[in-house]
Structure formats: structure tokens, C-alpha cells
Image (spheres, helix red, strand yellow):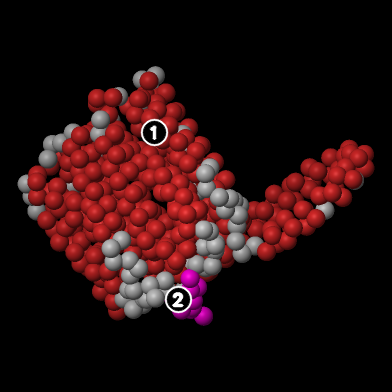
Amino acid sequence: MVRDANHSGLPHDAGNHHPVDRFSQLSWYMGSNSLWMAATSLQALLVTWILVGVLQESPERVGFGQMVIAIPGLVFMLWGGVIGDRMDGRVLLIRVQLLSAIPPLCLGLVIYADLLGFWLLITCAVGLSVIGAYSAPIMATILNRIAGRNLQVAISLSTGLGSLASIAGAKLAGEIEYFGAETILIIQAGIFVIGALLTSRLHPAPPLGISQLQTTSTFTTITESSSEITESSSEIREDSSEIREGSSEIREGLSEIRESLSEIREGLSEAWHIKTARDVIGLNCFSSFFNAGAWIVAIPFIVTRVYEGDATFLAKMVMIFTFGALLANFGLLKFMPLLRPGRLYLIMQLTRIVVLAILWMHPGEYLMFATACYWGINMGISTTMSRLMVQEIAPASHRSRIMSIFTLGMMSAVPVGAVTLGYIIGQWGPLNALIPGMLASLVIFFYGIRQTEIWQYESPISS
């Protein structure tokens, strides 16, 4: 049976923090999230420019490389959602941020040793992709806890500040020829580490919806004293326990794998049975195939082949696009909470057609930058609207898993779209790779109005 979109109501896990404490926690979260966005934006532009501008790979090979980078992270994303629902989110996020500092340092060593090549670059990028797969669902869950009834504002503010940080990351990546790749990669690793320090200031975020963990915690506290009394006798039995430990660990490992797969299936089932969530995730996936793919593959070749630009030119393009997203998210704060975010999401599909059409007609440099800015506004609004709808709908006990499915839906189409658009660029030129995005946006608009409840969706926290 398909459930109503508003079945989950308000977030149940917002907590009862004092307003001052909530503001403090939100500040630490925003700082950590912004640093993460800055570092990942730097990574994306740096890898793209090395592929296109340094190694001078063909469009087909660039598209293939982007696919190889993305797929491993996608494979681990659902697992990240499961982990996020089962362990302390703050601890997981700290580990992710610290581990994320390793791939940039490895790539820096590769470049310093003059060993840079296609596959070594891809290997380092894949490492960060896999580690980063764990971040998105748990960040969404932590934000729900901190924001409470101000979730829409918090999401928009988080995305806006993230966009501002992304501009800084893109600006730094554009200075690769001045500072050198090794220096930039060391800075990137440092950004990840500082982000982990900010995350450590957040309150613990134990999993919700698992009463057994709470019961176990209480029982552990009650029996702590008796455990100390029996410690001596436990040591006597230690040798025999070690004999059974190996087989017990094997059984526990197999049991944990089965349990994790079961939780992934449960998360997929939950997302499927919430109709609006299913529709938003599906349409975002379809849009990402052409629109995100066009940004990742087509834009770098438009910059280098059509406008004959360098790394600084590409960085400027990314910064202007991201600035548009920043304007969108801070502009949305004035109107939040929104009653019908789905309508704004669908209207943005029509305006994106105009954006892509102008770029396709090869405008002058200034008009191109202005159009890129509005493309950023458009994507900032549509991404925020889709994210907050799914985040509002998702029940607390499954939120990390459903948000991982949402992110997976957006990102899974990107690598396949990158390969497809790389082939189109190779055969018909980079500008013609924008045409499929126009058609996709038109399909999303009409399908969203006629076949889904997105247009009618009402936010449960707008009243």
C-alpha cells in the first residue's frame, strides 16, 4: 500500500535543545559541512582539469574516467545509509573526514614523483569517492536532529553556505598553475582535518528507532557494578572463551552481513512505498543523467574547445555557477517555510530549458557567464526543493537510508550520463551535448504534473 506523503509529519528526533545550544550546534555543523563542500568542490574541478587540460584526454575517455570515479562510491552509498542508521553519526562523520585527507596526499605524492597518469589519477579519486559515500546520508540525519522545526531554513542555509565554500574551493583549484597541484592537494587534506575538528564539537548522535540499543545501554549501566565483581572469575574462563571466539566471530560476521542487506532492502522498500519520495528520487535520477552529466563533461570541453579557456577560465565558470546556487539558497530563506516546494521544483525544469538553449547558441563570454549564473540559481532551487521534500517525508528510523537512496538516485545516473555525453561530444561537438538536457527537463515537467503528486505536495512543517 502506498503511503501518503505527509505520513511522517514533523521530525521526531529534533531533540529539545535550548535555543542557544541549538544555534551553537548548528554553527559547528555549518562550518563542518562548508569545509567538506569546499574540499570536494576543489577535488571535482582539479580532477576534471587534470583530465581535460593536463592529460588532454578525449571526451570519451573523460566520460569513462568520470564514470569509473563515481561508481565505487555509489556502490558504498547504501551501505553508508545503513551504517548511519546504526551508529553514532558524529563518530562516523569524524572518521570519514579524517580518512578523506589520505587520497589527496597520495595524489600529491604521485604528482611530486612525476608519475601522474590516467589510472593513478582515477585510483586516487576513487578512494575519495568511496570514503565520501558515507558522508551525505549521515549529514542529512544530523541536520534533522539539530534543526527541528526549522528544517527548511537549515537545509537552505546549509546549501547556501556550502555553495559559498564551493566557490572558494573552485577558486583555489583554478590557481593550480600558480601554486602547483601538490600545494593545493596538501591544503585540501588540511581542510578535511579541520572539518573533522569542527564535527567533534557536535553532540553525540546515537541511532534512533532501535530500542534494543537503548535497552542494552540501560542494562549495561545497571550491571556495571556486578560485572566488576565477576571480573576475576571471567579471567579464569578467558582461555576457553578464546577457543570459541573464532567461530563466534565468523557467525557474527555472517549475521551482520545478512542484517545489513536486510536493512538495505528495508530502506529501499520504505522509499518505494512513500509515493512522493519515490517520484522525486526517480525524477532527480533522470535529470542527473543529462543535466549533471552535461555540467561534468560538456562544460569543460565547451570552455577549452569553444572558448579556448584555461584552468582559470573553467574555475571562473564554476564559481559563477556556484554563486548562482548561493543566491538561490539565501534567497529562499526569505520565503521559508514553503507550503508547496514541489511546484517550485517543477517550474525550475522549464526555466532550465531556456538556460541550456542560450548556452547551446554559443553566446558571447559575458552572456555565457550570466547564463551560467542563472543555471546555478536554477539548480540551487531545484536541488534544495527535492532534498527538503524527501528529508521531510522520511521517517526518523529510516532517514539515513532513504537519504542515501536519494543521493544515490541523483548520482547513479551521472557516470552513465557522463559516458553518453562524452560520446555525443566526440561525435557532434560539446554544444550539442546540451540538447538532451533540454528534452529531459521538458519530460520531467509534464510527467511531474500529470503522473505524480509533487505539484500537490504540502510541507508538514509550513503550518
Q: Residue at x 45, y 53 (%)?
A: 23
**Which secondary structure, mark 1?**
helix
Query: Of residues 49 and 41, which is closer to you in this image?
Result: 41
- The answer to whether any part of residue 24 appears in the image is yes
Query: Amino acid type of disc 1?
Result: Gln
Q: Position of residue 324 (x, y in %)?
A: 22, 52
Query: Of residues 348 and 201, which is closer to you in this image?
Result: 201
Is the C terminus in the top left, top right, bottom left or bottom right quadrant?
A: bottom left
- The answer to whether any part of residue 405 appears in the image is no
Q: Residue at x 24, y 26 (%)?
A: 177
Q: Is residue 172 magenta?
A: no
Question: Are there few (<14), some (14-19), or many (20+) residues within 10 Å of tag 2?
Answer: some
Query: Of residues 90 and 179, which is closer to you in this image?
Result: 90
Q: Residue at x 12, y 40 (%)?
A: 307
What secondary structure is the stretch in magenta mostly built from? loop
Query: Of residues 357 and 209, which is closer to you in this image?
Result: 209
Query: Amino acid type of disc 2?
Result: Asn
In this picture, residue 302 sits left or right of residue 452 = left
Q: Position of residue 147 (x, y in %)?
A: 45, 60
In this picture, residue 328 sits left or right of residue 116 = left
Q: Where does the magenta region start and end?
A: 1-10
Q: Is residue 5 magenta?
A: yes
Q: Which mark is residue 24?
A: none
Q: Is residue 233 above or below residue 214?
A: above
Q: Is residue 95 above or below residue 284?
A: above
In this picture, residue 442 sits left or right of residue 266 = left
Q: Position of residue 260 (x, y in %)?
A: 61, 56
Of mark 2 and mark 1, the one earlier in the sequence is 2
Q: Which residue is mark 1?
A: 188
Q: Residue at x 36, y 25 (%)?
A: 182
Q: Which mark is residue 6?
A: 2
